[in-house]
């Protein structure tokens, strides 16, 4: 029930459900991992990392907990720690596209566009509906001044997840670089919505 509530954006109710699941069975790694995800989505990084750590104590091979911990460590600026967790997650479950998306973001932040692109290409290959992979790959292509390919990736991300604000911003900036001002203005307007 917590996962359903989290999907609906009711994080308080989801957190209450996860807390109850943990109370009923504190050895259930999935409950700790789910609460970690909800806290992470709510911006409670330290509490989320604590939950992931507990999940990994219970099950060191919990790939989703490793992935979540990697994402949290990325946001906290511990890129090497994030890479270690994400490498483990991918080794345990190489079929999850979003694991590669998250590691690709870390490589981008570390300044290694080649490894980032490799991971993002793999993420898209495994799960073409992974909108964040398209956005991040588009950002790299824009940084490399390949604006046409960047725009194609942003447009694909918009088809998949039109409510992602950052994709509209990145699309607008890319259109400015291509001197397509009316389209850029329209994308900026969508970004501000």
Image: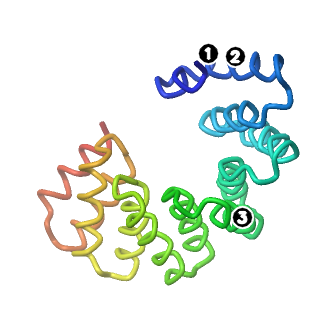
- Residue 50 on image: x %, y %: 83, 41
Closer-to-camera residue (17/45): 17
Q: Is residue 3 above or below residue 49?
A: above
Instruction: Tell me the residue at 83%/46% (across/down).
Output: 53
Instruction: Tell me the residue at 57%/27% (across/down).
Output: 3
Q: Nearer the viewer, mark 3 or mark 1?
A: 3
SS type, badge 3: helix
Q: Earlier in the sequence, mark 2 or mark 3?
A: 2
Q: Which residue is mark 1?
A: 13
Do the numbered discs 3 and 1 sit on residues whose CB atoms are within 8 Å? no
Do the numbered discs 1 and 2 sit on residues whose CB atoms are within 8 Å? yes
Closer-to-camera residue (16/176): 16
Instruction: Say the numbered circle drawn on residue 16.
Output: 2
Closer-to-camera residue (114/19): 19
Q: Quadrant of residue 80?
A: bottom right
Q: Which residue is mark 3?
A: 88
Q: CA distance from mark 3 to mark 1?
A: 31 Å
- Residue 154 on image: x %, y %: 29, 60
Quarter of the picture holding the N terminus: top right
Asked whether, in this view, residue 170 is left or right of residue 28, the answer is left
Say few, some or many: other residues with alpha carbon within 10 Å of mark 3 (under 14 / 14 to 19 / 20 or more): some
């Amino acid at each position: 029930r917590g996962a359903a509530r989290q999907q609906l954006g009711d994080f308080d109710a989801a957190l209450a459900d996860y807390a109850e699941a943990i109370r009923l069975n504190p050895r259930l790694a999935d409950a700790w991992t789910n609460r970690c995800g909800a806290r992470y989505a709510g911006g409670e990084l330290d509490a989320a990392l604590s939950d992931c750590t507990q999940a990994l104590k219970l099950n060191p091979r919990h790939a989703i907990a490793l992935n979540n911990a990697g994402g949290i460590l990325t946001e906290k600026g511990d890129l090497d720690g994030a890479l270690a967790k994400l490498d483990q997650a991918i080794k345990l479950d190489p079929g999850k596209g979003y694991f590669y998306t998250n590691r690709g973001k870390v490589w981008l932040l570390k300044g290694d566009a080649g490894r980032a692109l490799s991971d993002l290409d793999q993420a898209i290959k495994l799960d073409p509906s992974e909108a964040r992979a398209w956005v991040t790959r588009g950002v790299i292509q824009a940084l490399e001044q390949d604006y046409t390919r960047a725009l194609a990736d942003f447009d694909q991300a918009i088809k998949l997840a039109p409510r992602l604000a950052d994709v509209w911003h990145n699309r607008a900036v890319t259109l400015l670089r291509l001197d397509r001002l009316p389209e850029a203005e329209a994308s900026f307007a969508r970004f501000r919505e």
